[in-house]
């Protein structure tokens, strides 16, 4: 029986994951059988997780970070909502019947909707502006004394936009809420831009930042960061049968491969390797946006290496039939994510199929 082949990335234009860096792939293979959920037993991978969190802090502007390597952005976003709800309860002395809310732009990742559903909080989504960024005034109007968390996105999944994080943080503080930044995809690109997005730029409490996206680690390797130890304490539960006495993670058994891979990728690439990859991908994104405009298709000017353009439905369908892995935004625009595996040669081949007669 022929062994199944892994995903071929050559025609994948919609994914926010990519080929792992060779060092990350090697580290993942070496730590396949380890479980950072039991750090007293798997001490070496626990040390690597400490190193990974420290490096994530460097990327995100936090000198003394708390956190851990998650299964991905969804888990980190759920944990941010959970921590904020729990801290609000502790602050207010509230019983379990009180319903808190989370305020976020309508561009927020669908994982925050999952978090609200699972955790029993109200999610209040507010409109974005004409450039697909959060409207800080709308966030301020929606927040109140029951708001536990305000969420901003630094690198939206549909348009690659960066919300005005400092303004959102100010709105959150006015009602005593915590601030979460979802930089799952954008976090490894934003250090090389002029955007204000991280812990050093604003009064941010928690952040999602994923090594298995632009960080070039193997899947699964997400990241959850917190400014204060109290945030992790708000997530902790007792673990009586383990050598360690408590656990703040959402899952118990976790991927040692992901932890080791994240540490190895960041050791190999931070900061200069990530800078080179960002500059190359950003140049490709701008080139592709100009190519769409030259063909008469409206394209949003890219701020991060993601291009959104308005293509007719039949053309989109023909490109899918030609084998291109592409997707649409909720508003119907084509989105192309210029990940490291998406080369100029790949984009040229894509445009050649776009130009081919029907």
Image (tube, rainbow, N blue to C red):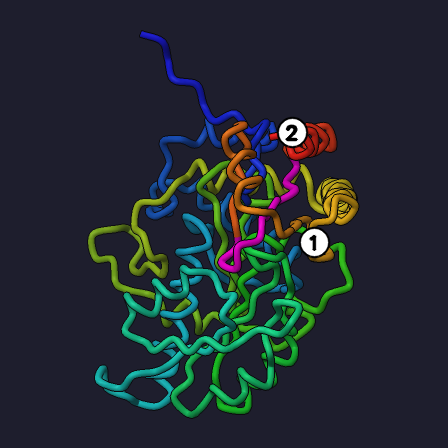
Q: Does the magenta stretch include residue 330?
A: yes
Where is residue 166 shown, x and y percent of the image?
65, 77
Q: Answer left or right for 318 relative to 230.
A: right
Residue 133 vs 35, above or below: the answer is below
Quadrant, the C terminus: top right
**Residue furthest front in the image:** 358
User: Counting other residues with Cα less than 10 Å from the Cα at mark 1, is it few (<14), some (14-19), or many (20 or more)?
Assistant: many
For the record, the magenta segment spans 329-340
Quarter location, residue 235: bottom left
Q: Nearer the viewer, residue 49 or 190?
A: 190
Residue 131 vs 29, above or below: the answer is below
Query: Residue at point 51% right, 43% down?
Result: 48
The answer, for residue 263, to whether it is visible in the render is: yes
Q: Nearer the viewer, mark 2 or mark 1?
A: 2
Q: Give me the C-alpha separation between circle 2 and circle 1.
A: 21 Å
Q: Is mark 1 on a helix, strand or loop?
A: loop
Circle 2 sits on which residue? 357
Quadrant, the N terminus: top left
Query: Residue at point 62% right, 55% down?
Result: 187
The answer, for residue 26, to whether it is visible in the render is: no
Q: Does the magenta stretch include residue 184?
A: no
| Mark earlier in primary sequence (2, 1) | 1
Quarter location, residue 234: bottom left
Q: Nearer the viewer, residue 287 or 355?
A: 355
The label on residue 299 is 1
Q: Nearer the viewer, residue 261 or 308?
A: 308
Where is residue 21 shown, x and y percent of the image?
61, 32
Where is residue 168 shown, x and y percent of the image?
59, 79
């Amino acid at each position: 029986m022929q062994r199944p082949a892994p995903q071929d990335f050559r025609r994948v234009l919609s994914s926010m994951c990519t080929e792992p860096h060779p060092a990350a792939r090697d580290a993942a293979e070496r730590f396949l059988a380890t479980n950072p959920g039991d750090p007293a037993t798997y001490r070496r991978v626990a040390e690597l997780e400490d190193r990974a969190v420290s490096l994530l802090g460097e990327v995100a502007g936090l000198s003394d970070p708390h956190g851990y390597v998650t299964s991905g952005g969804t888990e980190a976003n759920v944990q941010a909502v959970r921590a904020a709800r729990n801290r609000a309860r502790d602050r207010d002395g509230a019983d379990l019947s009180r319903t808190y809310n989370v305020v976020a732009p309508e561009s927020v990742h669908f994982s925050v909707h999952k978090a609200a559903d699972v955790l029993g909080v109200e999610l209040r989504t507010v409109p974005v502006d004409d450039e697909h960024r959060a409207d800080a005034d709308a966030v301020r109007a929606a927040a109140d004394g029951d708001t536990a968390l305000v969420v901003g996105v630094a690198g939206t999944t549909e348009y690659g936009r960066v919300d005005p994080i400092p303004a959102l943080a100010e709105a959150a503080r006015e009602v005593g809420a915590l601030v979460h930044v979802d930089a799952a995809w954008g976090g490894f690109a934003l250090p090389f831009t002029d955007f204000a997005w991280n812990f050093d730029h604003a009064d941010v409490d928690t952040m999602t930042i994923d090594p298995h996206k632009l960080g070039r680690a193997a899947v699964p390797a997400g990241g959850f960061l917190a400014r204060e130890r109290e945030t992790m304490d708000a997530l902790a539960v007792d673990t009586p049968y383990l050598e360690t006495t408590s656990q703040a993670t959402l899952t118990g058994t976790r991927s040692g491969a992901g932890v080791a891979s994240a540490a190895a990728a960041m050791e190999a690439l931070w900061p200069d390797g990530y800078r080179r990859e960002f500059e190359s991908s950003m140049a490709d994104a701008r080139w592709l946006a100009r190519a769409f405009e030259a063909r008469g298709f409206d394209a949003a000017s890219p701020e991060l290496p993601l291009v959104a353009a308005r293509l007719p439905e039949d053309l989109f369908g023909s490109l899918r039939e030609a084998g291109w892995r592409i997707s649409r935004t909720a508003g119907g625009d084509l989105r192309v994510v210029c990940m490291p595996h998406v080369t100029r040669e790949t984009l040229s081949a894509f445009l050649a199929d776009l130009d081919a007669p029907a």
